[in-house]
Amino acid sequence: MPEQNWNEHRTRKQYIDKLLINSKWGPIVPFEEGKTYDHASVEEYPTQTGPCDYALFHAKRPLIAVEGKKVSVGPQNVLQQAQRYARGFQKSPFTFGEYHLPFIYSTNGKIIWFQDLRHPLNRSREITAIHTPNALEELLSRDEDTAKAWLRNNTIDNPVLRPYQKEAIAAIEQAIADRKRNMLVAMATGTGKTFTIINLIYRLMKSGLAKRILFLVDRRALAAQAVTALASFEAEPNLKFDKCYEVYSQRFRREDLDEDIKYDSKVLPTDYLTNPKSRDSFVYVCTIQRMGINLFGQDGMFGQSTGDLDDESDADAKLDIPIHAFDVVIADECHRGYTAQEESKWRETLKHFDGIRIGLTATPAAHTTAFFKDVVFRYEYERAVKEGFLVDYDAVSIKSDITFNGAFLKEGEEVGLKDTKTGQLVFDILEDERVLAPESNEAEWTAPDRNRKIVKELKKYLLSQEETLGHFPKTLIFAENDLAHTSHCDQLIDMLRGEFNRGDAFVQKITGSPTVDRPLQRIREFRNRQNPGIVVTVDMLSTGVDVPKIENIVFLRPVRSRILFEQMMGRGTRLCPEINKTHFTVFDCFGGTLLEYFKQTTSITAEAPIKPTKTIREIVQAIADNQSRAYNIKVLSKRLQRISKNITQESRNEFNYILGEDIADFAMTLEDKLSKNWAGTIKTLQGEAFLHICENYQRPKREFIIAESAEDLVTSEVIFRAADGKELKPGDYLKLFEGFVRDNPEHIDAIDILLNKPKDFHTDELKALREKLATNPDALLDKFNERNLRRAYNKELADIISMIRHAAKNDELLTVETRVDRALSKVKAKHHFTEAQEKWLEHIRHHLIANLLIEKDDIDTLPIFTRQGVNYTQLNRVFDGKLDELLKEINEAVLT
């Protein structure tokens, strides 16, 4: 009999009794009048409001009323019956308002609901097992009100915390005070989520609200970083966190840790997981993959998308971990776009523990918000930039004709054909024209000229940046793939090394490919050493990697996920005072369309996890079991049609032999066949011969086309951002600037004086002009500051006066140095200067190149003069008492 048809008695005997025994509530005994119970689950225990299905006793005290129902009845609302029994329970030492028991459960043997009745605002919740007696005794011994009072009365006063980090901690503590048990904290990449949460962990443990805390990440390297951060955190004056509380981790390998880290992490004793004690107080840091294996063994293994496959080498090490093992579970980087199966394991792992759950993410995903329900604090990128805790970005659009239009190959052209399995390359002459679709670029074909010209275009910008910055800007390039024999990464690596000619160490690949030796070590080198200056990856460095020196992000792969895009962008947002980083640059190699697309999306994506792929064997079984039969028949039909389009003739013949007809015809008429001859057709589908060929049919040899003859046209331009999210080309941006200058002289005094009364334009006016431009106009995110105007004019060293005069009167655009040299040439043409005076004019020239104008006070205050041991009075004597007139003449020459 199917279990959904079982009655309540059978459900209790088959399922609910086992739940009680597994949670150490045995023996299960019938009620006997007048008997005293020490430790037992007593069936049909009488109360003033009716018999309770189970009353659970421990140490001679009744702790629990359990209401059991048959499998087909949902247990959530049934808690009301258990509440009734708790109200009517007699001979109990407990009174909590109207209740005489502290805890109640309801269950149908599959689903368990629980409520703590000690406080009227405690909400009922679903849990995965019944608490053990020790767990409930610990709950009863906890003084939660005192712990919450400590949090209220002790301000968040760590001076190292930033204001928004204090806000985040306060928001989490308030949510806990409001008795919320699931919460999400969304903080932009690079804003210090780990440091914030470590401060929170300390406060939760210091207050006594939590004793055992689980900190989950999804990569061993992140676990190693978190353990190190905990160990180095000064919890109390001259006392590190790990000297106040025990800190444990899973086992690491040497390459998981930074080279300069000497901290020796301690592996958590198994007993701490399987037999938690109220006296234990510790933090355990591990990957969610490791915890999944601990809980579910092989069933808890994640697939390759999460990395750390060697983390699963002992997948038989399943442990019996009770649900009260941790008071608080913190899931870091919980936005990951797992597959549906992996997302299910992620959810099961988190749901196993009956603790407060806190999710940390930069980009909340749909499955994340659905699980944690409430975003209690949000700190977004825009606010972080405004407050100076992250850097903003400039954007450059690189447009390629081949990227958008694909390639057209003519009859007679030579193409390279590479075997994707062996890498063997042969050349062939096309006997007919061929169109290569843009959407399959780098997947089925490549045009080396496209990649070569994009690399050349990129090189122009990087070398220009190097000249301006005084160092080479670390650059991260996201490529399409790193497949064996057809790797887009490898092609780019070869071209970049050839273009820059700075040795192999200067350009490196960091991916999960077995061809990359020790990728975690390569990442550390990228972060800490001069080389590599350029790294090419696919998505290994898209998240969870902190390299603050990155100043360029290059998108050479399409991105369709908002979460992935924001994480990739996040690699460049971090501050880096060491190199005076003010911004980073994004190169959109899809003509600006990536940036434009993601400007239109919302902060919280509605993306679902990656869809699962059922095997044909599973689909056939579902059809046989009448599980969504109509749907699965359609799925199987489409799957067989897909096979028919990608199969060798030999395998097609095998299908013909098994099915009695061509696989395509069989697929097209499958629904009709099952309708008319169910038994015969399902027998064929379930036959091992059919299933074997479905799983092992031969695919045609796939060839990757190398279109050497396809020539590309690649252009680039900077992109400017409007406040409404629109993107402007340089010409459009400069039109706005010209209009602003021409329309605003009467509103901005400095512009009016510069254009019409240059003799009255001094350093105060120059400062006011720069300040006005840096905050205008409201319609643009990229304001009219000198850096943006230089980018728009494509003249790196253009001076602000030239740009204003060019916009207003179409004067020639000059660099600062050219303007200063022309001005001094005019002055020198009118005067004869001595050798000593010429020497000081050279000092004045250097000052003007840096500051454009010179004032009398500058002589007495600026190092360029004071270092020479001279003041205004002394220098005035050098110029025969005419220095004041000379400075005015020089300034006027500079301005005109």
Image: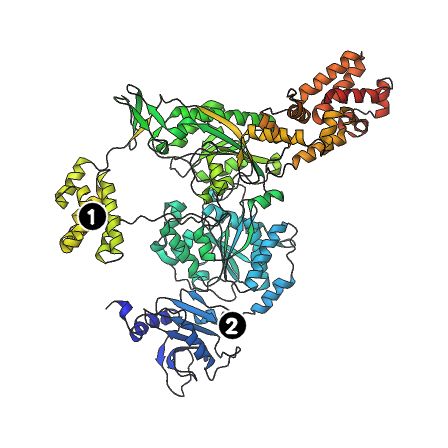
Classify residue 851 as left or right of residue 498: right
Q: Give how far across and how far down residue 565 sits, in percent.
A: 47, 41
Viewport quadrant of the C terminus:
top right
Q: Residue at x 49, y 37 (%)?
A: 595
Please state which of residues 63 and 377 is positioned toward the viewer in this rendering. Answer: 377
Q: Are marks 1 and 2 in contact (CB under 8 Å)?
A: no
Instruction: Please give the residue where the numbered disc 1 appears in the rendered image.
Output: 691
Colour logic: rainbow
Q: Residues within 10 Å of mark 1 (few under 14, many from 20)?
A: some
Local secondary structure at mark 2:
helix
Classify residue 318 as left or right of residue 667: right
Instruction: Please give the residue where the numbered disc 2 appears in the rendered image.
Output: 140
Q: Quadrant of residue 453?
A: top left
Cα separation between marks 1 and 2: 57 Å
* In this view, 485 is above or below 66: above
Viewport quadrant of the N terminus:
bottom left
Classify residue 859 as left or right of residue 356: right
* In this view, 744 is above or below 17: above
Q: Give how far across and how far down residue 355 sits, in percent.
A: 48, 62
